[in-house]
Image (tube, rainbow, N blue to C red):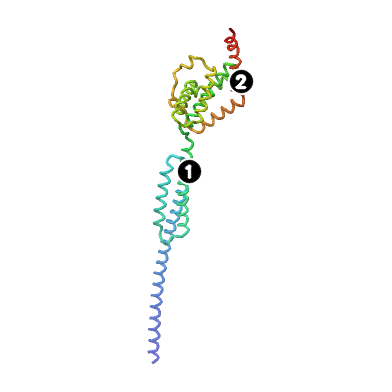
Amino acid sequence: MLQEEHDTVIDKLRSVEEKREEAEARARELEKQVASLGEGVSLEAKLLSRKEAAIRQREAALKAAQQTKDGRDVEVSNLRAELEVNTWYLPAHWNAKVKDETLGAMEQLKEAESEAKALRTMTQRMVLTHEEMEEVVLKRCWLSRYWGLAVQYGICADIAGSKHEHWSSFAPLPFEVVISAGQKAKEESWHGGKFTNSHLMADCYISYIRAGGDDDSDRRKLVRDINDLTGEGNIESMLSVEMGLREMASLKVEDAVVLSMAQQRRPNLVRQSVP
């Protein structure tokens, strides 16, 4: 009887030992699976960090592309296309923060495109229209002519020579150019054309010439169309001319020239009036 009970207990112990070994084997298998899963998670984390680094590099490339105009549109388009691809192919189990950062980068790209459009608009505005270029040329001729007369009559002798040389380099034929513009103004006025500021300046110049500023030989010179005269068509040339006109006005060069011309003409009028 006791022997039977002893055998039964031993069988139970063996059964329990076998179950324990099975449990340990299962536990080791689970540990291996957990370890394998951990390696996969770490690998996925590495891929995630690489993606984040790539996104930051693209953002840096975008900022660098904003510094130059050439190739801006191509660079922005390429970066936008790449970020859109990366956004749509992000795994569902990725951190939402990464998706938010990617979408934020896309918003920055949209802002960069808007800035590029604004820059193009600004660049186009910096280029003068044909009418503005015509006015710049006429004003250069005006400056060249008056500084030339200042040299002739000894007005502002210390700077007149250099000023005349400077503006003459931009307006080699001031007389011909302004006369041509004046004739244009008259023709357009006769045909109901638009009257511009440059036409007003040309008319003033013609009035000055008719008052005795140049002799008949000068008036018979071949006039040239203002469109044949080349010059910089940007806003800097306009500002330079305006500064030149203000300087000449502050020195009262025009008034001094008119006064000198009047004094020179007075003796001639007296001689003509004497019988």
Q: Nearer the viewer, residue 149 or 57?
A: 149
Q: Is 157 placed left or right of 63 in the picture? A: right
Please report whichever mark, 1 or 2, sits nearer to the chain's N-terminal start: 1
> Would you name the residue on which mark 2 appears?
256
> Would you name the residue on which mark 1 appears?
118
* Quarter placement of the C terminus: top right
Q: Quadrant of residue 130?
A: top left
Q: Which marked residue is nearer to the observer: mark 1 or mark 2?
A: 2
Q: Nearer the viewer, residue 165 or 228?
A: 228
The amino acid at mark 1 is Ala
Number of other residues with Cα within 10 Å of mark 2, as a class: few under 14, some 14 to 19, many 20 or more:
some
The total number of labels drawn is 2
Residue at 54% of width from left, 31% of height from top?
A: 239
- Residue 274, horizontal then vertical, whole percent: 59, 8
The amino acid at mark 2 is Ala
- Residue 206, horizontal then vertical, whole percent: 51, 22
Residue at 52% of width from left, 16% of height from top?
A: 214
